[in-house]
Every structure is written in C-alpha cells, then in structure tokens.
Image: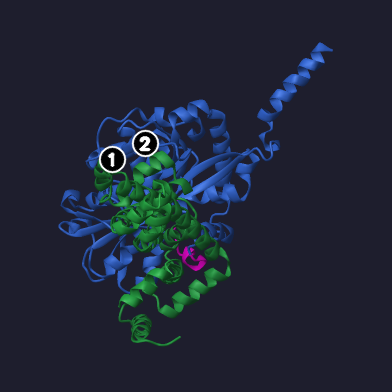
Chain colours: A green, B blue
C-alpha cells in the first residue's frame, strides 16, 4: 500500500493516543493506551465471541439495508413516475423524514418488541429516506430524450421504468445507498444498545458497565475499521455496477 | 376396570403438572429484563445451576443499560419479569401500572460496607450533607433508589436536600466526572465504588454510606411482573419463584467464597480482582409490606409522594416470606 499523507496523519493521531495514555497526559483508567486496546480486541476476537457478534450486527444491518433500500427505490420510482402518489404521500414522507430515528425507538419497541424485527426496522427506516430522496432526484434527472425514445420504440411503461429509467438513475440511487450504509451501521449499534444480548451494541454496554475500557475502545476501533471497509467495498461494487457512468464521466472530463 | 382406567387417566393428566421436570424440550420461555449489576447474581446462579430448567422454565435475559426500557417493556408485554429498583417500580405503581412484586432481589446490609457509597475529591473539605449545599452531586438517575438514599443521607448529615444540585451522570463515567471536577460529589453503586477507588484512589475518598447510614437493611431492588399475567399464569410464576429462590440460597451459601465472585464475574464481565474489593448486597427472597411502607414514606419525604395502594396488595405470593 502506498503511504499517503492521509495515512501519516492517522498514524500520527494513533501515536498521539498511545503517548497521551502512556505519558499520563490524560490520566484516567477510561483512557487506555492504544496498545492495550488492540491487545484487548485481539483477545476478544480470539475467543470467537466478538466475530459472532459482528456477524449478527452485520446481518441485522444488511437486512435493514435491503428492506429499507428496496422500499426507498420503489417509493422513489412511484413518486417520480406517478404524480398522484407524490401528491398523496409526499407530505407524509416529508413530515417523517426529519424525525431522528432514536426518538421513535420507544414506540417501535411497543409494536415490534426488542428482537430483530425492531432492530431491522430501525435500520430500514434510517436507510429509506436517503435512498428515496436520491432515487427521486435520479429519476427526475433522467434525460427526457431517452424516455421519449423508449416510447417511440413502443416500450411499455413498466419496462421503461425497469430498463431505461432505473439504469439511468442508478448512479444517483447508489450515491443514496452509500450515505445510507454509513448511517445503517451507526443505527444498528444504537438499536443493539437499547436492549437484548446480541450484537456489537450490547457488547459495548456490557463492557461499559464492567468498567473494561480497553475492550470498549477495542470495539470502537473495530467499528471504525468496519465502517471504512464497508465503504471501500461499496465503492468497489459501485465502480463495477455503473462502470459505464464512470467511463462517460472520464470522457467528458 | 373402570376405576383403574379412571386412575390411569387421572395419573396421565396429573403427571405434567406434578413433574414439570420431565417435560423436557417443552420448557416455557420467559424473558427477563436485567441490568448487568451485582444484584442479579441469584438469577444467573439459578440459570447456570439448572434450577429454572428443573422447573420447566427457560430464562432469556435481556440486558438494558438502565431502568429506561425495563418497566415500559413489561407493560408492553416484551418481558414477563423485570428487575428494577424499588423507587422506579413504586413510581410506576403510583401512575396506575399494575406491577406486582414476585421476588426480592437486593437490599442494604445492616452495616457498612454497603452497595452505595458517597465519594468526593480528597482535600475538597466536603464531609457532610451540609457541605454539599449549593454543590453538584452526581446520581446515575434522578428519582431512583440511588438518588433517594443520597438525599436521605444529605438530610441525615445536616443538609437541605433541596439545596443540593443533582446532576445525572451514568455510573461508568462518574469517577472521571468527579476526579475532573465536573461534579463535587457522586453517589456510586458497586462495583463502580471499587473501580473508582482502585483507579482514582489517590484523588477520591469515601465520606458516606447512603444506604446503611439512612436505612440499615433498607430495600433496594426487586423483580416485578404484571398483575394480569400473574392471575392467568400463577403456576408458572410459582415455579419461577421457586427456581429463583434456589438461586438465592446458592448465592447466600457462597458469601465470601470464590465461586460466587466467579459467577458474578462471568455474567457482568467485571474483572475478578476488582470484585474482591467489592461490597455485595444482601439477597432476600421476600418483599415485605414494612419495607414498601418505609420506601413510600421516604419517597413522600423527598417529593415523590402521591396516592399509593396498600403495599400488601402489591406482593404476589412468591414474594411473601
């Protein structure tokens, strides 16, 4: 890997972390040195407990992402293509959108319980809005010419939506998913912190109560790495899915 | 002939009732809301030692970071049983929620050390509740047992509790907040007392025991269930109570022994070395009218009064000594 200035900055900050704990600049047991944190993280990975919890969290996140994403894309398409739906539901969506998801967790607990259905719904709700907004804008930005051309060739409205509009709007939709992905991980952990024994979130609470700061920060470091890896993975996927868009972009530039 | 047949039928019907232990694979699942604290040691002992399984019950514990989701979850039917502190339970009862005590969980010991301690910075000169007037006192939550016993301690040591500014600070952050000067005093519960003295012992000191100094042996926390669930499934809760109380016996027989600390360390993840300096509560089985009357009187004294039902009516048969 090529070492860029950004990498040096991260290494510098990590070194500062280590030094601040070792040299007592921050004198608290709740500020363990990076080396202790990594040792604790390695120990918890080795027992197999943490990998199992990560898998559980990723599964919940993935399920919420899929459900919320699909709903977002379908609603976005409907809003853009069938004006009546936008008139009917647009206001409702705009009213619900600014509500912070953690604020609606208590009613969700009431209706959906404390298990996976509640946690996945929380993630799906978080994912829904950025995907919806981006889908809507992506569809509205599709060149009218290509839609008109489809119509000229006698392609029906459903096939037009699926084979002309959706691919053309895909770059915007994927941008929405990228925003949603980062939020999804955050919200999954928050939902797991509320109740239950599964996932990274509950592990964070447990370690906080047990006063085990190195383990707690170990999970936080892990979450940072996980979020970074997910984003990198998504970008790679994006480049394959809409290679034509990047190619066109490069030509234009 | 008909007599034997009837006997056989009766025996067949009675078997599952008389010997739930034989109904393997048909365990009744009960979800219990807990907090990862020392008080729930008997529950974990009963799970680990198979006392619940022997009664045909499978316990599914759900850990919450505080009382915030436990009691509402009970009302919403998410939990069959909730572990909570007595003040939060009684405030729910005051609001008309049909909580019933199914078992005691923990209470203060008669003399120090007890599970709550009041810590200040060394050299701050704060010694009594009177010194705390106009100062900032941290409690993990307002209007719970920690806060209530803290206010009682302030008054007992000559202060006016209304003049003390209570600040909500979660237990895990209390030692830093106190050492860093964000608060002037803090009411810690174990094992956070032991943790704070272990790590900040050069800067913090203990000046009081809010429980044993204001209410020796006083009530602290219990297990509750909903009245209608108890009315419909009394037998299940009888079995729950029996199993839990075997867990209480298990714990009480091992006071001061490594086996108990190992159990607590296993479910709470608190390092074993720290638990050796940790004060444990007393683990009662029963809930008495007297302790509920005491807490209602204390709550009324510190601004949490109201119309409370007769305390005896709140105690389910499993919690009667």
Query: Do callouts 1 and 2 mark residues in contact (Cβ within 8 Å)?
Result: no
In the image, residue B230 lies at what x, y percent?
Answer: 49, 29
Q: Secondary structure at mark 2?
A: helix
Q: Is residue A253 a member of the stretch shown in magenta?
A: no
**Residue sitting at 45 percent across and 64 percent down?**
B277
Q: Which residues are magenta?
A: B271-281
- Give the crowd class for mark 2: few <14, some 14-19, many >=20 residues within 10 Å: many
Above/below status of A191 relative to A231: above
**Residue sitting at 58 percent across and 66 percent down?**
A48
Q: Work out whether residue A4 or residue A135 is closer to the camera in this orientation and state it.
A: A135
Above/below status of B161 relative to B307: below
- Give the crowd class for mark 1: few <14, some 14-19, many >=20 residues within 10 Å: few
User: Is residue B204 rendered to the left or right of residue A181?
Assistant: left
Tell me the tag on residue B147. none
Specify whether residue B229 is in view: yes
**Residue sitting at 34 percent across and 86 percent down?**
A5
User: Is residue B102 rendered to the left or right of residue A93?
Assistant: right
In the image, residue A57 lies at what x, y percent?
Answer: 48, 58
Task: Give the chain of mark 2.
Answer: B
Q: To which quarter of the image does residue B13 belong?
A: top right
**Residue sitting at 77 percent across and 18 percent down?**
B7
Task: Give the chain of mark 1.
Answer: A
* Residue hosting label 1: A84
How far apart, in angstroms, are the residues tagged by discs 1 and 2?
A: 61 Å
In the image, residue A59 lies at what x, y percent?
Answer: 50, 57
The quarter of the picture where the N terminus of chain B appears is top right
Q: Work out whether residue A2 or residue A41 is closer to the camera in this orientation and state it.
A: A2
* Residue hosting label 2: B292
User: Is residue B273 rendered to the left or right of residue B7?
Assistant: left
């Amino acid at each position: 890997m090529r070492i860029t200035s950004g990498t040096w900055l991260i290494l510098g900050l990590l070194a500062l972390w280590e030094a601040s704990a070792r040299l007592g600049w921050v004198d608290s047991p709740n500020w363990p040195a990076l080396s202790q944190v990594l040792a604790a993280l390695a120990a918890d990975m080795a027992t197999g407990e943490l990998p199992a919890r990560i898998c559980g969290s990723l599964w919940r996140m993935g399920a919420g992402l899929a459900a919320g994403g699909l709903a977002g894309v379908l609603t976005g398409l409907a809003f853009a293509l069938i004006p009546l739906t936008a008139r009917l539901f647009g206001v409702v969506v705009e009213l619900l959108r600014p509500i912070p998801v953690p604020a609606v967790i208590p009613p969700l607990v009431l209706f959906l319980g404390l298990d996976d259905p509640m946690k996945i719904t929380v993630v799906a709700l978080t994912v829904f809005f950025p995907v919806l907004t981006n889908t809507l804008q992506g569809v509205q930005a599709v060149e009218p010419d290509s839609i008109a051309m489809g119509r000229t060739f006698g392609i029906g409205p459903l096939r037009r939506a699926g084979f002309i509009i959706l691919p053309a709007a895909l770059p915007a939709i994927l941008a929405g998913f990228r925003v949603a992905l980062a939020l999804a991980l955050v919200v999954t952990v928050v939902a797991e912190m509320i109740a239950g024994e599964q996932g990274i979130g509950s592990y964070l609470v447990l370690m906080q109560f047990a006063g085990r700061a190195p383990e707690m920060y170990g999970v936080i470091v892990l979450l940072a790495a996980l979020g970074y890896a997910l984003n990198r993975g998504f970008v790679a996927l994006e480049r394959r899915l809409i290679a034509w868009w990047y190619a066109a972009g490069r030509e234009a530039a | 002939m008909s007599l034997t047949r009837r006997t056989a039928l009766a025996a067949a019907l009675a078997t599952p009732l008389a010997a739930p232990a034989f109904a393997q694979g048909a365990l009744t699942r009960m979800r219990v809301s807990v907090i990862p604290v020392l008080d729930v040691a008997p529950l974990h002992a009963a799970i680990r030692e198979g006392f619940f399984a022997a009664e045909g019950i499978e316990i599914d514990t759900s850990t919450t970071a505080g009382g915030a989701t436990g009691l509402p979850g009970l009302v919403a039917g998410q939990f069959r049983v909730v572990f909570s502190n007595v003040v939060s339970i009684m405030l729910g009862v005051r609001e008309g929620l049909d909580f019933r005590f199914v078992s005691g969980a923990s209470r203060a010991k008669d003399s120090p050390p007890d599970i709550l301690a009041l810590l200040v910075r060394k050299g701050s000169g704060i010694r009594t509740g009177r010194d705390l007037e106009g100062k900032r006192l941290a409690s993990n939550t307002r209007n719970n047992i920690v806060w209530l016993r803290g206010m009682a301690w302030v008054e007992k040591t000559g202060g006016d509790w209304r003049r003390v500014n209570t600040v909500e600070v979660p237990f895990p952050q209390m030692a830093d907040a106190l050492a860093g000067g964000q608060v002037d005093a803090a009411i810690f519960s174990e094992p956070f007392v032991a943790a704070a003295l272990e790590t900040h012992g050069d800067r913090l000191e203990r000046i009081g025991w809010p429980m044993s100094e204001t209410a020796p042996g006083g009530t602290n926390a219990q297990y509750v269930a909903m009245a209608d669930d108890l009315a419909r499934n009394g037998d299940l809760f009888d079995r729950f109570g029996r199993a839990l109380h075997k867990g209480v016996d298990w714990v009480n027989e091992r006071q001061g022994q490594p086996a108990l600390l190992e159990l607590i360390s296993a479910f709470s993840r608190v390092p074993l070395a720290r638990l050796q300096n940790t004060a444990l509560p007393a683990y009662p089985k029963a809930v008495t009218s007297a302790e509920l009357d005491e807490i209602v009187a204390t709550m009324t004294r510190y601004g949490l009064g109201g119309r409370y039902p007769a305390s005896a009516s709140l105690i389910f048969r499993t919690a009667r000594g």
